[in-house]
Image: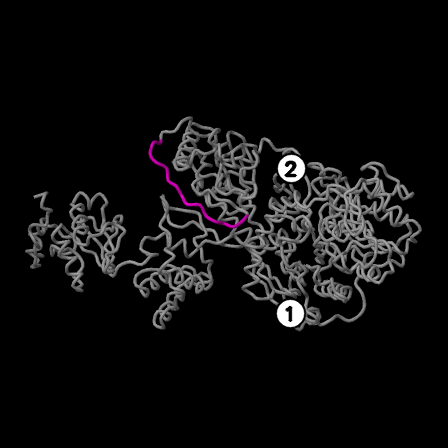
Amino acid sequence: MSAPSMPAEAQPESFAFTEANLERARALIAKYPAGRQASAVIPLLDLAQRQHDNWLPRAAMDTVADMLSMPRIRVYEVASFYTMFNRAPVGKHLVQVCTNTPCWLRGSDAVVSSCRRKLGIDFGETTADGQFTLVEVECLGACVNAPMIQVNDDTYEDLDGPRTEALLDALARGERPASGSTTGRSGACPAGGPTTLTASAERAGIALPSAGSADILPADDR
Amino acid sequence: MPKLTIDGVQVEVEPGTSVLQAAEKLGIEIPRFCYHERLSVPANCRMCLVEMERAPKPIASCAMPCSDGMVIKTNTETVRKARRGVMEFLLINHPLDCPICDQGGECDLQDQAMGYGFDHSRYGESKRAVTNKNLGPLVATVMTRCIHCTRCIRFIDEIAGVPVLGATSRGEHMEVTTYVEQAIDSELSGNLVDVCPVGALTAKPYAFTARPWELRKTESIDVFDAVGSNIRVDVRGPEVMRVLPRLAEDINEEWISDKSRYAIDGLKRQRLDRPYVRRDGKLVATSWDDAFAAIAQRLNGVPGSRIAALAGDLADAESMLALKDLMIALGSPHRDCRQDGAQFDVSARAGWLFNSGIAGIEQADAILLIGTNLRWEAPLINARVRKRYLQGGLKVGVIGPQHDLTYPTTLIGAGPQSLEDLIEGRHGFAAVLKEAKRPLLILGTGAVQRRDGLAVQALARRAAETFGMITDDWNGYNFLHLAAARTGGLELGFVPGEGGLATAGIVAAAGAGELDVVYLLGADEIDGGRFGKAFVIYQGHHGDRGAHRADVVLPGAAYTEKNATYVNTEGRAQWGRQATFAPAEAREDWKILRALSAVLGHPLPYDSLGAVRRQLAATSPVFGAIDARVAASWAPFGGPGAVDAVPFAAPIENFYMTDPISRASVTMAQCTEAFILPAREKTGTHG
C-alpha cells in the first residue's frame, strides 16, 4: 500500500501567511539560534495549516521551506511524517477516532459505528457538505477515559454510541461542546467517584468531586 | 589512538574510526546496506550488528566509534542470529523478482541474503507495493524493491548537492521520493544507480539489456571531459553495454558524470565504418587503398606551407603524435589541437595545467573561479569543491557568469576588469584570498577563448602571485580544460610550429584559399563551410560536422575501441584500453596515419604501439609517467596587452551534448529535452 499522495486538484497556486501569522512566524523562528531556524519547521507548518482550513497545500510547504531556507523535500518529509498535518482538504470538523486496544476494549466499535451511521461516511471520507471528515487514528493519549475521539483540537472522552451521536449533532449545529469527559467526571477521576483517602479529605474539609453520571460503562458491559 | 580487539585480534586505529572500519582494516567483512564510505552514517539498516563485550545487546558497528579496550565479536551465534533477523525483516517487503531485476547478479541484498540470511521465508502475508517514481531519463525506479537504506537521499544531498530526494511518510508507508514529480537535475545522478544496494534504482538506458556475468570488463579512461575519470567499460560481444566508474581517489573518487556513463549509446549511431571519397559532390563509400590514393593524388606537389592539421577534442596522444610527425614530414608548420581558439603560452606548462591537482582542492580554503561553469565543465571537480565546502571554512568567489554550483559563491564580477579590481584590492573578496592559507584559482576555458586570452592569463598569473597562491609546497594556479585531448596535444606539441598558423589562422587561410589541404583529426567543432575550397580530410569515428564537409573520410576508432593515451587537465597521462573493436573497416587512429604516411612516401618511424609510446615518452616526460602527475615549475606566462571589457562567456551551452559521441546519443538528447530546454525557456536567454 502506498502512502496517500497529494491530490493534484484543489492545490492552490500560492500561499502567503497573513500579516498577523507572519509576525507570529517570525517570533517562532526567533526562538531558535541563528542558523538553526529549520527547527521552527513544525510550528510554522502548524501555523500554516491553521490558517489554511486545517490542511497544508504544497504551496504552504514551499513557503515554509523558503522562509527557513531549507530544501523543500525536507519540509515534505516532515509534513508527511506527522499525521497531524493534513496534506489534502478536510472537513470543518476532523473527527479522529481512536481504535487502539484500550479504546477498543472500552467500546470504540460502538463509537465508530455511531460515526459511520450518523455521518454516512467511512474512514478517510468527507461528508458531501464538507462539514465532517472521519479518520481512524492511533492512541490519542487519554486511555484512562477511553473510548475517545478528537475533533480538531478538542478531545471527547468516556464516549459511547448515543453520546457520540449527541456530540456529532452538537457539532453539526455549530456548537463547540466542552472538551474532556462526556460523562462529566473531572479529569481522570475514578468513574464512580473517589474511593481512596475519602476520610482524609473529609477531615481536611475538602469537598469531594461528584461521581458524575453513573452509567458511564458502555451498554454491553453493564 | 584507541586499541581494540576484534575477533581476538588487536588493532590500533585513528580516533573516530568506526568499529566497521576497524574490522575492514583487519579484513573482517561486516555486511551492510546503509553504510557507504563517502556518505554520512545514519545506521538505519541494522545489518552491521556485532557483539560488544559488556553491551546488553548487539551494536550497529558502522556508527559505533572505536574506544580503548573494546572487545568486539563479529562471528558469534548472537551476531548471526541478529543478522538473520534483520535480513528476514528486510525481505518481508522485498519482492522476489530477482529473475527480472537488472540488479540481479550484482545485488548486495541478493549476496547478503545468501551469506547472512535465513534459508527460508516464514512470511505468508501480502507484501507492500510502492508506486514507481519518474526521476528523469537516466534513473529507472522500481520502488517496491527499496529497502530504505537512504543512500540515494544522502548521495544526492551530500555529494551531488541537489537535495530533491527524501523519505516521506513513515513506517510501512515510508517512501523514497521527490514528492513532487521531477527529474533529478544533477550531472551526477547516474551514480544513484551505483549507490543503490538493491534494484530500486537502475539505469534506464541499460534496462533489461544485459546480465553482469555476460559482460567483459575493461578498465579504461573517460574522454567526455578533461578530468580523465577512471572507468570500466562493460562489453557484450561487439557492443558497449555500459560504463561504470572505477575507484581513483585522486581523480573521480568513485563517481562519474552522467555524460560519461550514458552517452555511450552514441557509439552505435552515426558511425563511420568505411572510407569515403567525395565524387561529384557526393561522399561515396570506397576502400582504404582508394581513399589513400585520393589523398596522395591531391597532396602531390602541394607545398607543406599550404597544408594544415587540426586535432579534435577526443583525439588520443598517439594519433596526435603521428599526425604531428606526418605534418612535419610534409613540411607543414600549420597545426593546432585547440579548435576552440584558446590561447596558451605553450612553453610554460604551469599556465595550462591544473597544478594543485584535483585532490589538492581538499586542502584549499579559498577558491576563485574565473570564467568557468565548473558544474558543467567538470562535474567531478565541482563535486570535489563541494566536498571541501562541506568540511567547512571554504569561501568561493566567482568572476564570470554565476551558476548554481551546489555551494554558495560570492559574485565578484563578470569580466577581466573585475579580476583586475580584485588584484588591486578593490573588492572585499581580496581580503579573503589574502588571509587564506591555501588559496586557489580555477581559470576556465571560457576566459581564454578570446582575443585577449593571453592577457587574461597574465592577469590570472598576477592574481595567483598577489594572493600567495604560489609557494614552495603549493601551486594554486589551475587551468581547467574541457577536452580530453587538449592537455595531451599541448604536451606533445600539437601546436603551430615555426611560422605556423593556429586554429583561427588556419580557418581564415583555408577560407581565403591560402591553404589547399586541411587534415581534421576528429575536429568537429568548426563549421565546415568556413574551410572554403580547401581539400578536407576527416579522420574520426562519427559522421558529425567534420565528416559532412570532408572530401575524404577515414574511419577511426572511438575511445572504447583503441589502446590510447589521454592526459587529463592535471597533466596526468593515463591509458585507455580497448574494450571492443571499431566497426567494419574502421581502424585505430595512429595506425591509419602510419599507413597513410607510407603511401605519401614519408613512413613514420614506428610500427607498434610500444614504439609510438616510446616516441611519446621521448617527446614529453608526462607520457613516461603513466597515472602519475608530472608537476610543472612556475614560470612567467601569459601575454602583454590590455584586456577587453567583454564579460566572460560560458563555453558550454549544453552539458549533455559537447562532442560527436554525445551528439549522436539518444539518451543525451532525452536529457537535453528534460533538463536543458525547459531551463532555457524559463530564463529566456535563448530566443
Answer few, some or many: residues within 10 Å of disc 2's Cα (few below 14, many 20 plus, some between 14 and 19). Answer: some
Answer few, some or many: residues within 10 Å of disc 1's Cα (few below 14, many 20 plus, some between 14 and 19). Answer: many
Query: What's the residue at 69%, 36% (across, down)?
Result: B580
Asked whether A201 falls inside the magenta stretch, the response is no
Q: Which residues are magenta?
A: B123-137
Look at the numbered disc 2 and give the secondary structure of its residue: strand
Query: What's the residue at 89%, 59% (across, down)?
Result: B499
Residue B394 lies, in percent from the top left, at: 59, 59
User: Is A44 or A211 nearer to us in this picture?
Assistant: A44
Q: Which mark is residue B561?
A: none
Name the residue tied to disc 1. B413
Q: Quadrant of the N terminus of chain B?
A: top right
Query: What's the residue at 16%, 61% (across, down)?
Result: A177
Name the residue tied to disc 2. B239
**Left or right side of A216 for B206:** right
User: Is B587 or B1 nearer to us in this picture?
Assistant: B587
**Left or right side of B185 for B328:** right
